[in-house]
Structure formats: structure tokens, C-alpha cells
Image: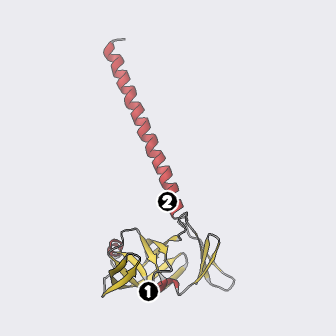
């Protein structure tokens, strides 16, 4: 076999090996990305039920960091919530508010762990999680938040019954 043909086969072999590694790493990153997403938000598919008293119920699992996250809806559009009983209002990052076409109302100020910040009042027609749906909710647009989660504060949660047992939070309407 000529020398040039041997070099060509070795080059092809190297390229095939590199391609196999790239594909393997890509598949592994997809696999582990899905696992990490489920660890961050174990409530990706919320199951609703009706209690014996006729109340709508959902159950949320706490994530590894001790937070309750849940997929839900604002004005019928899908969002991810981070439940925050320390937040007075539902707090929406400005970039998400734009996607939801929310109108910024009057300027207000909020006390946070990092000090006082400027926010903008707004009203939400509807917030839903599973079969629980509430209407006309006070909220704020927060230009200082840079996350993909909306803080689900007490302007929503105060209308519901919350029961925590172990790592499960039952929300009842």
C-alpha cells in the first residue's frame, strides 16, 4: 500500500475518532442537562386533584436548594415560578414582562436584601398553576432581576391554603 494512502486512512481515522467524541460529548451534555433541569425544578409536570371538600390541589416537591419552583401561566402564557412567601407582590423580571406584553404602571420602591430598588406596578389578569387559577393579581415589574423565574409572592399566595410536610408543599384553592 502506498505511503500516501496510509496517511489518508490515518487522517480519516483521526477525523472519525474526533467526530465520535464530539457526538458522545454532545449526547452526554443533553442527558445531564435534562437531569440538572429536573433537579432545579422537580415540578415540571404538575398534577392537580380535587380534595374531598371540592378544593383544587397541587403538590410541589422542594428542589435540592430548598426552593419550590413550578411551571405555570400568566395571562395564559407559560412561565416558571419560584414561590416566595417573603415577597409582598408577584415580582416579574423586566425581560419576561416584555415577553408577556405587560404594561409598566406607576413607579414604586421595594425593600430587598440588597437594599431599596425601583420597580413598576402592574396587574395580571390571571395566574395559573395546574388547575388553580386566580384573577386580577397585583404584581411588580422588576428591572433588577436577571433570572428566568418569576417570584410568586403573597399577592397570589395569600388567597390559597399552603400546607408543608417534609419536602412537599400542598397548595389548595
Residue reaching furthest to the right: 52
Q: Where on the picture, by quarter, is residue 144? A: bottom left
Image x and y of residue 130, in percent = 54, 75
> SS class of the residue under badge 2?
helix
Q: Residue 149 at x, y = what percent?
A: 43, 70
Task: Please tell me how crowded label 1 is: few (under 14), some (14-19), or many (20+) other residues with Cα within 10 Å.
Answer: some
Q: Residues within 10 Å of mark 2 (few under 14, many from 20)?
A: few
Q: Residue at x 51, y 65 (%)?
A: 41
Colour basis: secondary structure
Task: Report the residue marked by disc 1.
Answer: 137
Position of 152 with respect to 7 (left or right) is right
The residue shown at (36%, 78%) is 115
Which quadrant does the C terminus fall into? bottom right
The picture places residue 84, in percent across and down from the top left corner, at 49, 77
User: Which residue appears at 41% of the width and 76% of the height?
Assistant: 113
**Quadrant hosting residue 111:** bottom left
Residue extending furthest toward the top: 1
Circle 1 SS class: strand
Query: Is residue 13 shown left or right of residue 166?
Result: left
Q: How many marks?
A: 2
Mark 2 vs mark 1, CA separation in Å? 28 Å
Relative to 2, does residue 85 appear above or below in the rendering?
A: below
Nearer to us in this view, 31 or 51 = 31
Query: Which residue is nearer to you in this view: 131 or 93?
Result: 93
What is the quadrant of the N terminus in the image?
top left
Mark with earlier residue (2, 1): 2
Instruction: Confirm or deny contact between disc 2 and disc 1 (CB under 8 A).
Output: no
Q: Which residue is mark 2?
A: 37
Q: Residue at x 34, y 72 (%)?
A: 99
Q: Is residue 157 above or below residue 27?
A: below
Q: Which mark is residue 172?
A: none
Using the rendered view, name the quadrant where residue 62 is placed. Answer: bottom right
Amino acid at each position: 500500500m502506498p505511503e500516501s494512502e496510509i496517511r489518508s486512512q490515518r487522517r480519516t481515522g483521526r477525523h472519525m475518532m474526533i467526530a465520535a467524541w464530539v457526538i458522545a460529548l454532545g449526547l452526554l451534555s443533553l442527558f445531564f442537562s435534562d437531569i440538572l433541569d429536573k433537579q432545579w425544578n422537580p415540578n415540571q409536570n404538575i398534577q392537580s386533584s380535587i380534595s374531598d371538600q371540592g378544593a383544587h390541589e397541587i403538590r410541589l416537591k422542594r428542589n435540592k436548594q430548598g426552593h419550590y419552583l413550578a411551571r405555570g401561566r400568566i395571562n395564559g402564557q407559560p412561565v416558571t415560578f419560584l414561590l416566595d412567601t417573603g415577597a409582598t407582590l408577584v415580582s416579574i423580571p423586566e425581560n419576561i414582562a416584555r415577553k408577556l406584553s405587560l404594561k409598566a404602571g406607576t413607579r414604586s420602591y421595594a425593600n430587598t436584601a440588597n437594599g431599596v430598588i425601583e420597580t413598576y406596578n402592574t396587574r395580571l389578569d390571571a395566574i395559573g398553576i395546574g388547575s388553580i387559577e386566580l384573577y386580577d393579581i397585583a404584581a411588580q415589574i422588576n428591572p433588577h432581576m436577571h433570572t428566568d423565574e418569576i417570584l410568586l409572592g403573597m399577592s397570589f399566595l395569600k388567597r390559597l391554603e399552603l400546607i408543608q410536610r417534609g419536602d412537599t408543599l400542598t397548595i389548595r384553592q
